[in-house]
Image (cartoon, coloured by chain):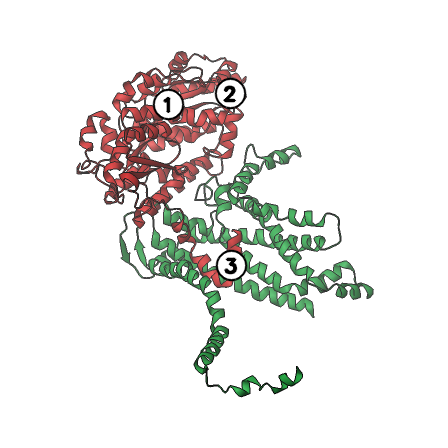
Chain colours: A red, B green
Amino acid sequence: MSVIRRRLRTVAVAALAAGVALGSTACSKSDNEGSTGEGGQVKLVLQTFSNFGYDQAIKDFEAANPNIKVEHQKMGELRDFQPKLVQWLAAGSGAGDVVGLEEGVLLGYVQNHDKFANLLDLGASDLKSGFPEWKWNNALTPDGKKLIGLGTDVGGLAMCYRKDLFQQAGLPTDRTEVSKRMSTWQDYIALGKEFKASGKAKAAWLDSATSLMQPHVMQNSETFFFDKDNKFIGETNPIVKQTWDMGLQMAADGLTAKAQRWSADWDAAFKNSAFATIPCPSWMTEGVIAPKSGPANSGKWDIANIPGGGGNWGGSYLAVPAQTKHPKEAYLLAKYLTSKEGHLAAFKEAGAMPSDIAGIEDPAFKDKKSEYFSGAPTGQIFGDSVKNMKPVFLGAKHQQIWETVVEPQMQAAERGQVSSDAGWKKAMDEAKKLTS
Amino acid sequence: MSSAVGAAPPRHAATPPTPEPTHRRRSYRLGRWDIKYSPYLYVAPFFILFGVFGLFPVLYTVYVSLFEYDLLSGTKEYVGLENYRVLLDDAQFWNAAYNTFGMFVLSTVPQLVVALMIANLLNRQMRARTLFRMGILIPNITSVAAVGIIFALIFADRYGLVNWLLGTVGIDPVAWRDNRYASWFAIAFMVDWRWTGYNALIYLGAMQAIPRDLYESASLDGASTWRQFWKITVPLIRPTILFTIIISTIGGLQIFTEPLMYGFGLIRGGASNEFQTLAMYIYERTFTGNFEYGSGAAMSWLLFLMIVVFALINFAMVRRSVKGEQK
């Protein structure tokens, strides 16, 4: 309800009511037409979500390519950007020359690859050896003839923990010792019970039962909700149900803070030190945990290895929509941002871990220590976590299924609003409805 | 002087309509056209804009609603009324309709009643009148997204202000999102916070147009303030009340941003869609998941029809009841 809408009289009722769905279509469109202006300069539009950390990298790129000007449009969170991008791709205009795609939605675009330029035709075949094989293959069509995206970051995985709370409960605080005490998930749960039994720390062990899903499933299965033919298997994939039960058992044992992830309560739980551990990919350390916990908790966090050894959570790609008028220049930009220089600049700015092999090996990443996390060697910890990782096939609608169906049901079950069985059944029914 | 004037032949008589007849007739005709057609010209910009940005999308929505249309791949297939049939069978659609109407009633009724009371109070002689009159509009000019974020914090389950206040008087915390009616209440509260002042100001404007001598004679006859309010004020601002009801119906049934922000930006409105409205479900179907453009268009039309029917019912009901008071 806005003032303007209210002012329109009954004549406009029709437009208001039926135009809801169309209303947002006409919103912001980027002005990237006829941009070969003065002195043959090309203007490129780069659209990303969340924080890719490209401010410095873009400056460097422009300095090296004086004929190209880059306008970086930061489009909010993934859930804000994704629907807009789909509209622009459908409408044939409005999308940037280079756009960011998250791994959870990437496969949907690979299936509809005609909306994107083939980077192999633009010269990307030479870059293949620079990326881990799985990162490269994810953006490749099944016939291997078309590549729609170049890898930006990779999540990596570790366990962030509160040193001060560990100390209160009489647990070890040193990160190698902590890593040793939670080398498997069973150890991790046992340590959590010890933490709780001490009765000394006024905090839960883990933020939410749902935090286990991503790391535990990704470590123990090559698939998640979909098999490699993109058929929904969430109901039959034993690891998914097993992790669901494991998380909810922890909740039943009183080990979780029952905070709904990405909600106001979750934010407040960080500030109020309501839990002692949280599995954390690289982008979450400086990008989420540090700002949400605030400066008052600086130096109280530390980072240990993830139980179960290694794993990945999140990571993105840069793609060039077919509607661009400057495919060559757009490719140059995507190539630069996913090169070693681009990766390291993004890591420095946003904590996004490089996915290219040269970047991971570079001392600027390898020797990085985080001040906020008690000087933990983040480069080394996250670098190790992806060394032996196996790629996990996510499927075209992974993010959708997880974020809108499974996670909310698991949270409801965790809060005791529905039984675990009822929540599971509802989640699976809804997921099947979405994938049918 | 007078003779000279008298001697001068009357102009119009001396010059018969010979020298510039065509010019005259043209300007006369232009004048007639001006009177006849220029009003249409003046209102034309609205209708042209409405045609382009209002009517065309509306009609195009009808067209799209007849197709199974995948927004992402762009494939479409004519399916006739299938989209409508599927929707009428869809439990989530009816759930969204139930939520929308529930929140609408829960927000609009108190909103308009309170607005009427506030307007009545502000219509009296009081100090710093303008300050109060402008003050009640302030919530309305704040950004709806900001309001949504703040209220989502106030009604947070664990660290929220409301639950904390309830806790201090020994009441158990309310599950503000898992309980359907609690979530409706919180969202209705948000809507009312924003719109009560706006409606109060509209009522106040109408009340000021009521001649004061009506009240004077009423009080001379011994009518109490309460009686004056019901017998004079309310019947005389009836057209304005009807206007606010229609406008609130249109706005209230399209509610989108408030419940979206209340659910921390998640389009499904709660784990079991406790507070997902029709507008949210349209968005979910069209722009997420399976990108069912046709289905979203069909739903937009169903929502439109509901609003029309509902606005007409409201209109009829209120007109009758207020008329009844007047007798």
| Label 3: element kind | loop
The secondary structure type at the circle numbered 2 is: helix
Q: Nearer the viewer, residue B29 or B121?
A: B29
Identify the image quadrant of residue B327.
bottom right
- Up/down of B232 relative to A118, above or below: below
Cα distance between the residues tagged 2 and 1: 22 Å
**Residue A6 or A72: which is nearer the viewer?**
A72
- Quarter of the view holding residue A133: top left
Q: Mark 3 and mark 2: span between their CA atoms?
A: 51 Å
Q: Which residue is mark 2?
A: A297
Q: Position of residue B138 (x, y in %)?
A: 61, 46
Q: Quadrant of residue A391?
A: top left
B138 relative to B213 in the view: left or right:
left
Q: Is residue A124 left or right of residue B18?
A: left
> Looking at the image, is A413 positioned above or below residue B105?
above
* Residue indicated by mark 1: A348
Which of pointers 1 and 3 lies earlier in the amino acid sequence? Answer: 3
Q: Are marks 2 and 1 on the same chain?
A: yes
Label 3 close to label 2 by CB (< 8 Å)? no
Please state, as top left, top right, bottom left or bottom right, where the N terminus of chain B lies in the image.
Answer: bottom right
Q: Residue at x 51, y 57 (%)?
A: B250
Q: Earlier in the sequence, mark 3 or mark 2?
A: 3
Task: Report the residue marked by disc 3.
Answer: A8
- Position of B321 with respect to B184 (left or right) is right
Of pointers 2 and 1, the one earlier in the residue sequence? 2
Res B108 seen here: yes
Provide the chain ID for the residue under circle 2: A
Query: How far across and down, in percent of the image, does residue B86 sit?
Result: 36, 56
The chain identifier of the residue carrying mark 1 reads A
